Image (tube, coloured by chain):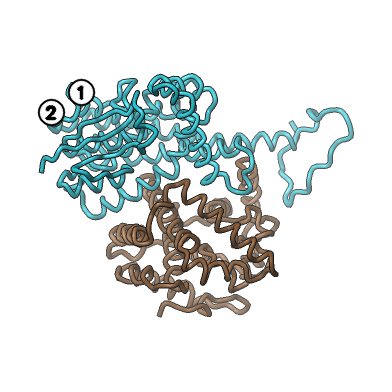
Chain colours: A brown, B cyan
Amino acid sequence: MSLAAEAFVSQIAAAEPWPENAALFQPLKGEEVTILLPTLQAYLRMCNLPVQVCCRANAEHMSPSGKVPFIHVGNQVVSELGPIVQFTKAKGHSLSDGLDDVQRAEMKAYMELVNNMLLTAELYIQWCDEATAAQITRPRYSSPYPWPLNHILAYQKQWEVRRKMSAIGWAGKSLEQVYEDVSQCCQALSQRLGTQQYFFNKQPTELDALVFGHLFTILTTQLTSDELSDKIKSYSNLLSFCRRIEHNYFQEHERPGLDPLSIRPSLM
Amino acid sequence: MAAPMDLSCWGGDWGLPSVHPESLIVLAYAKFSGAKLTAQPVDRTWRMLTETVPTLHCQGSTVTEPAQILNFLRKQRYNADYELSARQGADTMAYMALLEEKLRPALLHAFWVDAENYANVTKPWFSSRCPFPLNFFVPGRQASTALSLILLTKGESPLNSIAEVEAKIYKEAKECLNLLSYRLGSSLFFFGNTAASLDAFVFGYIAPLLKANLPSSQLQQHLKQLTNLCHFCDTILKTYFDVNAPGCLPVFSPSSPPSPGSLSIRQDAVDANLQKLTQLVNKESNLIEKMDDNLRSSPQHRPRGPPSKPSSLPSEKNSTPA
């Protein structure tokens, strides 16, 4: 969203409390893996905000920025983690209020690290590794569309992702180097987490939701090789962190009408 | 251990050993860790076409990209991060990612895409240091690489015009500078009294922005107000880059920490500045919203003609017309 629209939305958002019928829209299961889905669900549950999950085939087109999943609250539609965090903050629910400036700087830096390394690595493995792309990603991405649209869209998306990778300098990396980068990133996260419950001690913040979302997706997505999830499993405190969040926020709060995350393959 | 190492990099100006951020990162790290690097500027040679800058040559092996070069130097036992704890190492990685995501696009824009800066500063500098006929197309090629990087990483679907992308990247860059300033606080370097790789990265990105004579740069203005970052750059320049011969060991001895009295006064000044700057960044976004507000709530200032129906808002503002 443009800056003006963002400022406008947060002004409007502050006026109303969180309604009961808020909905989180995602594309149909079996389509492109959405990394943000567990992140958003975790974040909203950490804030104690009820939300219903709805699956729609055209979710991508309904979203204001083209990214899924997005939330529909009252009269507003907001997508992507950053704007949603601002939106909930405007409504008075914020997880990072208790942090001082230096801690907030650290939190933002770690969120960028996760976005920079893990997200790019996931994109690379899905689209630039020919084996994975041919066997898993392209069929999954093109499944809702008829022939020949499915081929065209899948190749177009692959071309876009490869262009972006070469712009940021990842095109020359081999798969082993990417695995190595992911491993270093997880090592940094593991060292930051240490023996604490959450990244900023007792209270979860949006960083915890983001890390949980990425790790959960990597651990539960089927890829051609298990090397990536093995690397994460080698960091035991990250694994127990994921299990703890899943246990605290996704298995105790089952309300009728919701689509609990436990239907998806769990980490246990 | 002392194998001769050559670094090809861009030359220096404006008081810096190199004007290219990535080259500057490597040069700074080499000084911090005591590695002997011979800097071979690619200015005025044809190597700038064939080599990606910076590149380290050592005993037949070549390494490119600052992060890889730093890894290589660490393996050669030139390690400036030796005294960092594991958690500080993790923080280093996180802050490096922050710099690359938030600050680098704005820097590229300020030097290569912004028309005034490019025409008055960047292009003349690079053209004057390229041999004929490279001076005609090398700067242009770098500019289009910079633009495509910005558009591909930041110009995603709803932000279709370059003006909106510019607004977004400058806002993020200013926030990033504020965050760095908070983290630095009033200490000499980011992790205590010794310089480490994070200091090299921050110095490499910030120093050109600080020292270049950019005619139009809101980012430079913003940076100059963050006095602790400016002081950080000047300290590094003075202590590590004052020796005349390039590549020799630094004559630096860790300076004694400033006295507590002046520390608290500087801390207060720094805090006051930071608060002012955070308010400024917030004001920018609030200003837009206020303008919108005023437009909707003052019927006297509407132009003559059929009054346009305001779009139905879920909750009308209670502000009375001016």
Q: Is residue B10 above or below residue A231?
A: above
* Residue A182 location, quadrant: bottom left
- Please name the residue that numbered disc 1 is placed on: B242
Which chain hosts label 2? B
Separation of marks 2 and 1 at Cα, in angstroms: 9 Å
Please state if A90 lies on the left or on the right of A107 as rendered. right
Amino acid type for the residue under numbered disc 2 = Val
- Identify the element where label 1 is drawn: loop
Provide the residue designation for mark 2. B251
The residue under the point 72% across, 43% down is: B318
Chain letter for the residue marked with disc 1 in the picture: B
Q: Which residue is at 63% across, 47% downward?
A: B158
Disc 2, disc 1: CB below 8 Å? yes
Closer to us: B97 or A144: A144
**Is residue A92 at all visible to an observer of this figure?**
no
Closer to the camera, A31 or A64? Answer: A31
Asked whether the residues under marks 2 and 1 belong to the same chain, the reply is yes
